[in-house]
Image: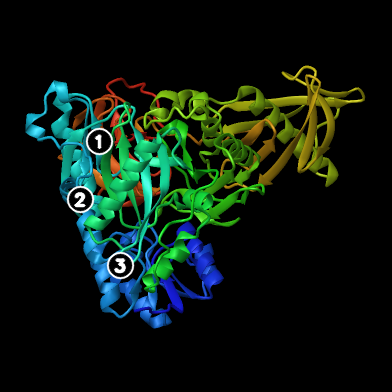
Amino acid sequence: MERPITSLLVANRGEIARRVFRTCRDLGIATVAVHSDADSGAAHTAEADAAVRLPGDAPADTYLRGDLVIKAALAAGADAVHPGYGFLSENADFARAVTDAGLVWIGPPPQAVEAMASKTRAKELMRAAGVPLLTPLDPDDVTDADLPVLVKAAAGGGGRGMRVVRARAALADEITAARAEAAAAFGDGEVFVEPYVERGRHVEVQILADAHGTVWALGTRDCSLQRRHQKVVEEAPAPGLTDALRAELHAAATDAARAVGYVGAGTVEFLLSADGRPYFLEMNTRLQVEHPVTEAVHGVDLVALQIRVAEGQPLEAQPPPPRGHAVEARLYAEDPARDWRPQTGTLHRLAVPGGVRLDSGVRDGDTVTPHYDPMLAKVVAWAPTRAEAVRTLAHALERAHVHGPVTNRDLLVRSLRHPDFAAARLDTGFYDRHLPALTAPDAVGQGLAALAAALADSAGRSRFGGWRNVPSQPQRKTYRAEPDGTEHEIRYLRTRDGLAAEDFPGVRLLHAAPDRVVLEADGVRRTFDVATYPGAGAGAAVHVDSPLGAHAFTALPRFPDPTARTEPGSLLAPMPGTVVRVADGLAVGDAVTEGQPLLWLEAMKMEHRVTAPAAGTLTALHAEPGRQVDVGTLLAVVTEPSGDAPAHPPAKETQP
């Protein structure tokens, strides 16, 4: 029986909420948003026809409160709930509560969600259905011959509660750590151990099923480029698969869906070994972040199809055939060169050239907070061939203006242009092997960008009558490159013969304005777009975009504050977040060793371990579970035996 939907609440935020709203507008469906206090001015809140406040900032108080979400839907007159991805999207109890409230649940039946919620139970069901999978290992029986192994949380996803173990002596501790992280993240500390497949590929199949017995396998996706077991670049179709392997994956995915009576959109994920053998990983009972590449290749709107299936409408007997190739890159507010540390602050500008699809949860001027996932946007390119799609995406990202927190944009561009990626030599160890080269600073481009910033600043001062140096003396300006910290002291004179800049022999200035500088270097003319944003504390933020790449700087004062120093041994919070754990039994007066884990911070849905920067004595501890901290908050003090120990700003932080 069909039940038309007229008003829909999205139990989510950011990019996915806006994505669902876009389809609702196309279908003539009214939209309802829910928002935390931190998201009161967010784009998804403003775009909905109605919005309901969820008091608080933390996900546990807001977007994870199913009772409040259902109450909001009823109050706003919605007749359906779309969960998006993350948060409550794979919570069977929430799905039941939605239907019990008389609302349409735009997702699979609760029993299917429940069947796949535990990875251990899901594997048992898949084994019975004949789907190939890895054999789990008993932790007590693991031998050196079994290494490496993977410790994995039975619940949840997103790489949390997951550890690769290469030494048998470390297994017990890693299981304990994985259980603690899983319990904190999902409320379920169950973990399991299985063989870790080196240089495996992560390949998945998009499925869509209706309530009338039709199951579509909408092609494959490759999601092998990952950091912290989370995807960074995805593409469809997965390149290099034989027709036989593709057919095997499609059959296994549809078998998995039928085994649990699946209805709606979902994804069956596989790990391909180096010799091409597929193993079932898990089934995600929701829409995936990377669904746009499937939409681009098959010419469908998966959200519209989700809604129609939820209304009771049947699918066609066969899905639309694929055409061309699509690649998606996730733009994150994070620093890949520093353990993928998440970044916060004001996003001054996000502008991506045309010719690509941009799905974003943020607008110019929005604040990136520590409460939620650091993904800013997804950029998707489609073309008739893989090479063309990759080239289009890399070019769009390179020409994008991303002004604000540090992002992974440069990493994405370099990844797409790496020979291994171009040749489709893909596996989950890509960043383990190539990250240092992919994150190395571009010294030449950075220097020219700093020069352009200084010339733009001078042009602005001259234009508006501000202070300027005596023309006969070199003008000086110092910039600190972000995030690598390289300082550039720019010294130059503008003479009758043109520009005379130290360390830039032969560089000619062709034009200078506050927002644009044109330079000629080695006979090549290039334009540098310069944007300056007032800063708090250190100085203005300056972003320089050119064909040589994008560079961000902090303009440093001519006379630094001599009092701005860190006391020796101080461990400062490397990011805003929440203290989730302190090492068992840790107390003031304890002796600690260099690299010893002291406490764990949670920021943007990931857990970050803070370690002692040196051996010594813990003389102060200001962290306790539940405490929220800002960047630079004093967490602890480690006093070294020597009285002339150096300062340690900020605390050393590593991934678990």
Instruction: Indicate left or right for 590 with 577 as reference.
Output: left
Q: Nearer the viewer, residue 589 or 592?
A: 592
Residue for badge 3: 65
Q: Nearer the viewer, residue 290 or 236?
A: 236
User: For the residues marked 3 and 1, what is the alpha-carbon distance in whole angstroms?
Assistant: 29 Å
Which numbered disc, 3 or 1, marks the residue closer to the eye? 1
Instruction: Work out whether mark 3 precedes mark 1 in sequence or the reverse, and give the earlier one.
Output: 3
Instruction: Indicate left or right for 594 with 390 as reference.
Output: left
Name the residue rendered at 16%, 31% in the picture. 171
Q: Residue furthest left?
A: 140
Residue for badge 1: 163
Looking at the picture, how far across and down is residue 628, in whole percent? 34, 52
Which element type, helix, strand or loop, lies under badge 2? helix
Few, some or many residues within 10 Å of mark 1 (<14, 14–19, 20+):
many
Name the residue rendered at 34%, 39% in the picture. 229
Q: In this orientation, does residue 71 appear?
A: yes
* Residue type, label 1: Arg
* Residue type, label 3: Arg
Residue for badge 2: 122
Quadrant holding the N terminus: bottom left
Looking at the picture, how far across and down is residue 60, in whole percent? 30, 61
